[in-house]
Amino acid sequence: MENKICEISISDSWLGDTYIFYEDNSIKRVFDYNSLSCDVTEWLKPKQISKHNKDKLIKKCPESCKEKIMLILDYP
């Protein structure tokens, strides 16, 4: 794993849902299932992320890395 590009949180409630993007195009998701199952980690490929979540990620993405994240996510 290489350097981190950025970290984007798309949580709408008290349950966390954060995506971390790396220079090697890998995507790490850290999220909470519920209050007893917190900070679950999974590694994703762009195809595993719904269009709805991709839209949220791009919307909340910092402008400085938006173009790079769009390429990683194969968005739109």
Image: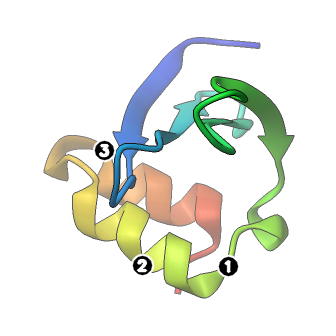
- Label 2 neighbourhood size at 10 Å, few (<14), some (14-19), many (20+)? some
| In the foreground, 2 or 29 | 29
Q: Amino acid at mark 2?
A: Asp
Q: Check disc 3 and report its element: helix, strand or loop.
A: helix
Task: Establish if 24 lies above or below 45.
Answer: above
Residue 55: image tag: 2
Q: Position of residue 56 (x, y in %)?
A: 38, 71
Q: Amino acid at mark 1?
A: Ser
Q: Hey, which quadrant is residue 58 in on the image?
A: bottom left
Looking at the image, the residue that sits furthest to the left is: 63
Mark 3 and mark 2 residues within 8 Å of each other at the beta carbon = no
Q: Position of residue 5 (x, y in %)?
A: 44, 28
The residue labelled by disc 3 is 65
Q: Is residue 32 shown left or right of residue 8? A: right
The label nearer to you, 3 versus 1, is 1
Q: Which residue is pictured at 31% across the width and 55% down the height?
A: 66
- Label 3 neighbourhood size at 10 Å, few (<14), some (14-19), many (20+)? few
Q: Which residue is pictured at 64% across the width and 73% down the height?
A: 74
CA gap between label 1 and label 2 equals 9 Å
The label nearer to you, 3 versus 2, is 2
The residue labelled by disc 1 is 50
